[in-house]
Image (cartoon, helix red, strand yellow):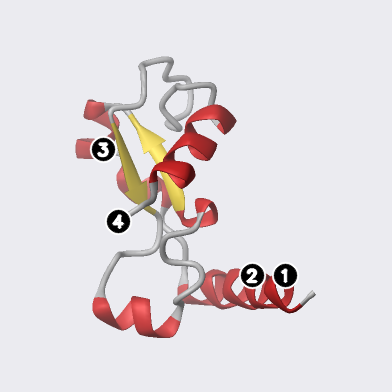
């Protein structure tokens, strides 16, 4: 579950609009790009609820277009390492 702070950051980054290309509908919900599962939480603990893994979608976009924003395990590994390095510095 995304924190209110993460939702606010994503909302501001997307100017309150759906992430779907050419959509100007307001954000209705926040979606995990990498599925929010126990397995992924264990494997990518820093990424799973971070702004990098979040996108805001309108109601229609969440029902029909969420697959457009999925990230691969390889991408998730890179993001997790990036976040780990940020914490160390």
Query: Residue 63 appears at what percent x and percent y?
Result: 19, 37
- Determine the image quadrant of residue 74: bottom right
Q: Earlier in the sequence, mark 1 or mark 3?
A: 3
Q: Answer yes or no: do the residues labelled 2 and 1 have beta carbons within 8 Å?
A: yes
Q: Answer yes or no: do the residues labelled 1 and 3 have beta carbons within 8 Å?
A: no
Q: Residue at x 25, y 79 (%)?
A: 38
Up the image or down, 36 lies above or below 63; here it is below
* Residue at the spot of label 1: 86
Q: Residue at x 50, y 67 (%)?
A: 47
Q: CA distance from mark 2 to mark 3?
A: 26 Å
Q: Is residue 78 left or right of residue 61?
A: right
Q: Residue at x 72, y 70 (%)?
A: 86
Q: CA distance from mark 1 to mark 4?
A: 22 Å
Q: CA distance from mark 4 to mark 2?
A: 18 Å
Q: Which mark is residue 74?
A: none
> For numbered disc 1, what is the local secondary structure?
helix
Q: Residue at x 33, y 47 (%)?
A: 31
Q: CA distance from mark 4 to mark 3?
A: 16 Å
Up the image or down, 10 lies above or below 26; here it is below
* Residue at the spot of label 4: 1
Q: Which mark is residue 62?
A: 3
Query: Residue 54 appears at what percent x and percent y?
Result: 44, 49
- Packing grade of label 1 (10 A; few <14, some 14-19, many >=20) is few
* Residue at the spot of label 2: 83
> For numbered disc 4, what is the local secondary structure?
loop
Q: Earlier in the sequence, mark 4 or mark 3?
A: 4
Q: Earlier in the sequence, mark 4 or mark 2?
A: 4
- Packing grade of label 4 (10 A; few <14, some 14-19, many >=20) is few
């Amino acid at each position: 579950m995304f924190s209110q702070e993460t939702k606010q950051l994503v909302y501001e980054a997307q100017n309150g609009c759906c992430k779907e290309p050419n959509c100007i509908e307001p954000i209705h919900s926040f979606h995990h790009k990498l599925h929010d599962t126990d397995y992924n939480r264990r494997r990518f603990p820093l990424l799973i609820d971070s702004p990098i893994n979040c996108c805001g979608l309108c109601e229609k976009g969440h029902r029909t277009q969420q697959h457009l924003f999925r990230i691969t395990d390889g991408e998730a590994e890179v993001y997790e390492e990036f976040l780990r390095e940020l914490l160390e510095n």
